[in-house]
Amino acid sequence: MGVSFSRYLCLSVGMTYPAYASFKALERPESGHDKNYWLTYWIVYGALTSIETVMSPLTCIVPGYNISKTLFLFWMMLPQTKGATIVYDKLLCPYLKKKEPYVDRKLEGIQEAAESALSYFLRAWGQTIADQIVAIQKSNEFKQICMAIKAWASPSLPKKRKKRSSDYESQSKQSASEE
């Protein structure tokens, strides 16, 4: 119970506030410094998450890991401490600059392999997938779902509802009183 709560707290602290602060920085035209600060935070956070993923078997046995990580994330995001900037400037940037040519070559190879695999997949299965999509689109269920979504999403259109027996009773009473 304690581990799941501390993990939840760690994820909330590490992502929720920084995501909102990043949104605010992007939406304010004069916030060039904030954009830089939060971009730096996300670079460090991504590197930390990558390392943590590889090291996950060890993080499970370290007592207080999630609480320590939460405190570290607070240190990284607070403008008074500028922790993300310190980690980026002192550790991450020098390391990435040194490894940049190697990483670029590897990423280029991965991109080429992914494009080749996608091309093969589309040649092998593309027509089958397209036929299945056409069949789904022609089905009555699909049309009914689309109509229901359109009706739900269009507040200006009057909603059609099924008449209940009470509606018929009130309608017949109203007709009788008018006569």
Image (cartoon, rainbow, N blue to C red):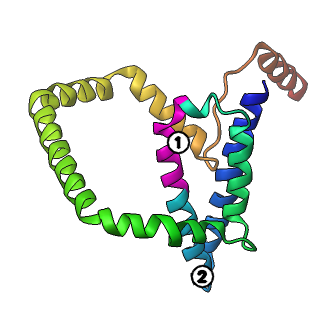
The picture quadrant where one finds residue 100 is bottom left
Q: Residue at x 14, y 35 (%)?
A: 122
Instruction: Report the span colored magenta.
Output: 45-57
Residue type, label 1: Glu
Closest to the observer: 90 or 121? 90
Residue 171 percent coordinates (x, y):
80, 23
**Residue 20 shown in magenta:** no
Closest to the observer: 114 or 92? 92
Instruction: Looking at this view, name the residue that lies furthest to the bottom.
Output: 30
Residue 83 visible in the displayed image? yes
Q: Looking at the figure, which quarter contains the C terminus? A: top right
Q: Residue at x 69, y 36 (%)?
A: 7
**Residue 55 shown in magenta:** yes
Number of numbered callouts drawn: 2
Disc 2 + disc 1, Cβ < 8 Å: no
Q: Main secondary structure of the magenta part?
A: helix
Q: Looking at the figure, which quarter contains the N terminus? A: top right
Residue 64 percent coordinates (x, y):
74, 37
- Secondary structure beneath dot 2 equals helix
Residue type, label 2: His
Q: Is residue 138 left or right of residue 18?
A: left
Q: Residue at x 31, y 24 (%)?
A: 136
Residue 110 percent coordinates (x, y):
21, 47
Closest to the observer: 117 or 85? 85
Q: Is residue 40 left or right of residue 63?
A: left
Tell me the number on the disc at residue 33.
2
The picture quadrant where one finds residue 84 is bottom right
Give the mark nearer the N terminus: 2 vs 1: 2
Q: Is residue 11 left or right of residue 42?
A: right
- Secondary structure beneath dot 1 equals helix
Residue pointed to by mark 1: 52
